[in-house]
């Protein structure tokens, strides 16, 4: 897991402007991470990068479409639904 943190730090140290693909890849790490500290750190980085990206935008509609397309293009992201015990509606009556 330390390799993932180092990889993220190395990418950010390059001082490249944020890209939609880069933000989506970091978000994918956050979604698939099993350790909560890594999730929190990567979500914070995603928020920072999004704020940087939004500074130069007047309308967010095109950016939203780019993000949706970037998420759709990810091949290694597998989100299996979490099975939660379903409550029957009769139990609430």
Image (cartoon, helix red, strand yellow):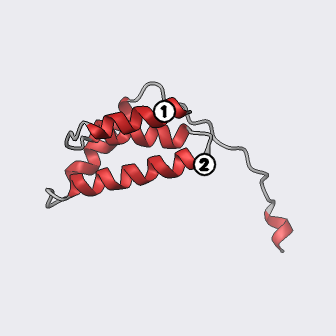
Left or right, 50 with reference to 36: left
Q: Earlier in the sequence, mark 2 or mark 1?
A: 1
How many numbered marks have been drawn onto this rendered protein structure? 2
- Nearer to me, 4 or 60: 4
- Residue beneath the point at 62% across and 40% down: 34
Report whether residue 8 is seen: yes
Q: SS class of the residue under badge 1?
A: helix
Residue 78 percent coordinates (x, y): 54, 31
- Nearer to me, 87 or 2: 2
- 17 versus 1 height, above or below: below
Residue under circle 1? Answer: 4
Quadrant containing the N terminus in the rendered view? top right
Residue 80 image label: none
Circle 2 packing at 10 Å, graded few (<14), some (14-19), many (20+), is few
Left or right, 55 with reference to 74: left
- Residue beneath the point at 24% across and 40% down: 19
Residue 6 percent coordinates (x, y): 44, 34
Q: SS class of the residue under badge 2?
A: helix
Residue under circle 2? Answer: 36
Quadrant in the picture for residue 14? top left
Report whether residue 71 is seen: no
């Amino acid at each position: 897991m330390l390799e993932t943190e180092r990889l993220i730090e190395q990418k950010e140290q390059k001082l490249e402007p944020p890209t939609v693909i880069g933000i989506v890849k970091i978000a994918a790490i956050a979604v698939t991470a099993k350790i909560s500290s890594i999730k929190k750190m990567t979500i914070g980085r995603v928020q920072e990068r999004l704020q940087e990206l939004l500074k130069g935008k007047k309308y967010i509609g095109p950016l939203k479409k780019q993000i949706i397309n970037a998420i759709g293009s990810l091949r290694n992201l597998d989100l299996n639904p979490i099975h939660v015990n379903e409550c029957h509606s009769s139990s609430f009556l």
